[in-house]
């Protein structure tokens, strides 16, 4: 799994193009993220809503598993543009959805395509990365993405006030146009120049399971996605419908809470490259996630500063885990290893299958805030998975 060397100037320019493309795509992805559950909740109850997300993410896992073969046959750059078109169409579908069936169909296309497009981006970025600076490259890339996520919640709340839930979906769809134009005009730089691995996906799954480092970092990624599924689907519902916080305040809170991704990820990546390695930072990240979820369970006030602080604190933990998840994984795989990248990215839809599945069980017997208590306990298992990793330092 050795890195393919490229001309430094070419790689730098290509990475800058991809960073800015990632920023625009992130705004497009984030605009619907924190409103989607409340939007769907207009059509169906909370239990059925969970089934919506489970169904969409089961299909996503299926398509991700098939994706390496498609990348090898059609090439990643061509697929990136094709998936981008499907992604835009799904957002237009959500903007026009007026019944449960159309909402579900659009949600499925949106969930599948939004996961696949980020795999395409992973392969593109990894094609221009070097092992010695993986932490720096990946965390700069994720910082650009997280800048988009910071802008989006407040903008999404503003758009809801202007035109209900449909407008954020519509704006998100139009944001795909500049990304498509960038890819069209920069195709000579970004087209595939990688000889992809010929390993079958079944072989990749066996090797991933048999390698303690790949297996360990996969479960680290899965736990982080479990946290995200709770944070994106159920915390907005809990704060809006149970605690009673209005969308204007929530939009501002959600923008504030994402600032740690800008502050901490690049320093964490540099520290992992040059000094500590990843394990120590992962331990700290999981401790913060567990404590913050416990706060979600215990605190009942509607105070703005209290909830903004808890949300901010939770994302300190998430940012550290996210940075080290990316750094560690992409130090041990390369762009040609698309099968491993795809298996790694199944953690995202799996998190959105397991999280809503747990929510269905818990909500049958207990109030929603007990989901946060169970998730806090689950986050503690992260210490075991991190301990199994061989540190890169």
Image (cartoon, rainbow, N blue to C red):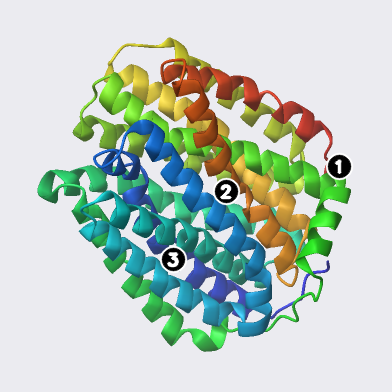
The disc label shown at residue 390, or none: 1
Residue 376 quadrant:
top right
Q: x%, y% of residue 365?
A: 47, 16
Q: Which of marks 3 and 1 is nearer the N terminus?
A: 3
Residue situated in front as seen by the camera: 218 or 184: 218
Q: Which residue is drawn at 78% across and 70% down?
A: 3
Please, is residue 158 above or below residue 110 in the view?
above
Question: SS of the residue at dot 2?
Answer: helix
Q: CA separation, marks 2 and 3? A: 23 Å
Task: List the residue tagged with mark 2.
Answer: 348
Q: x%, y% of residue 388?
A: 84, 35
Q: Residue at x 61, y 56 (%)?
A: 138
Task: List the residue tagged with mark 3.
Answer: 20
Q: Nearer the viewer, mark 2 or mark 1?
A: 2
Q: x%, y% of residue 72?
A: 68, 79
Q: What is the quadrant of the C terminus in the image?
A: top right
For the image, the number of numbered tags is 3
Residue 347 in view? yes
Q: x%, y% of residue 4?
A: 77, 75
Q: Earlier in the sequence, mark 2 or mark 3?
A: 3
Look at the numbered discs 3 and 1 and tell me whether their residues touch, using CB distance below 8 Å.
Answer: no
Q: What is the quadrant of the N terminus in the image?
A: bottom right
Question: SS of the residue at dot 1?
Answer: loop
Toward the bottom, the furthest residue is 188
């Amino acid at each position: 799994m050795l890195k393919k060397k490229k001309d430094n100037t070419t790689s730098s320019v290509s990475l800058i193009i991809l960073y800015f493309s990632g920023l625009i795509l992130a705004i497009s992805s984030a605009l619907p993220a924190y409103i989607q559950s409340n939007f769907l909740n207009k059509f169906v109850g909370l239990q059925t809503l969970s089934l919506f997300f489970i169904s969409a993410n089961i299909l996503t896992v299926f398509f991700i598993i098939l994706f390496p073969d498609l990348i090898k046959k059609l090439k990643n750059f061509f697929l990136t543009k094709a998936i981008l078109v499907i992604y835009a169409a799904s957002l237009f579908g959500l903007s026009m959805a007026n019944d449960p069936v159309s909402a579900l169909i659009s949600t499925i296309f949106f969930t599948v395509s939004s996961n696949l497009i980020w795999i395409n981006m992973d392969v593109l970025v990894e094609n221009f990365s070097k092992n010695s600076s993986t932490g720096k490259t990946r965390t700069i890339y994720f910082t650009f993405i997280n800048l988009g996520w910071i802008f989006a919640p407040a903008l999404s709340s503003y758009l809801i006030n202007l035109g209900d839930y449909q407008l954020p979906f519509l704006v998100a769809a139009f944001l795909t146009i500049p990304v498509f134009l960038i890819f069209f005009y920069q195709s000579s730089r970004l087209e595939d120049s990688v000889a992809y691995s010929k390993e079958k996906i079944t072989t990749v799954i066996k090797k991933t399971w048999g390698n303690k480092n790949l297996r360990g970092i996969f479960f680290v990624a899965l736990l982080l996605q479990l946290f995200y599924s709770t944070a994106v689907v159920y915390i907005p519902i809990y704060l809006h419908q149970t605690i009673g916080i209005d969308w204007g305040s929530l939009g501002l809170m959600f923008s504030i809470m994402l600032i740690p991704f800008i502050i901490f990820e690049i320093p964490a990546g540099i520290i992992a490259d040059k000094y500590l390695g990843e394990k120590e930072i992962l331990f700290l990240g999981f401790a913060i996630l567990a404590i913050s979820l416990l706060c979600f369970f215990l605190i009942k006030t509607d105070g703005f500063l209290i909830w903004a602080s808890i949300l901010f604190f939770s994302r300190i933990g998430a940012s550290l885990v996210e940075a080290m998840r990316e750094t560690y994984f992409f130090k041990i795989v390369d762009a040609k290893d698309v099968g491993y990248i795809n298996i790694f990215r199944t953690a995202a839809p799996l998190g959105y299958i397991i999280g809503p599945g747990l929510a269905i069980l818990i909500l049958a017997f207990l109030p929603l805030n007990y989901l946060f208590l169970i998730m806090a306990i689950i986050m503690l298992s992260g210490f075991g998975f991190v301990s199994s990793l061989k540190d890169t330092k």
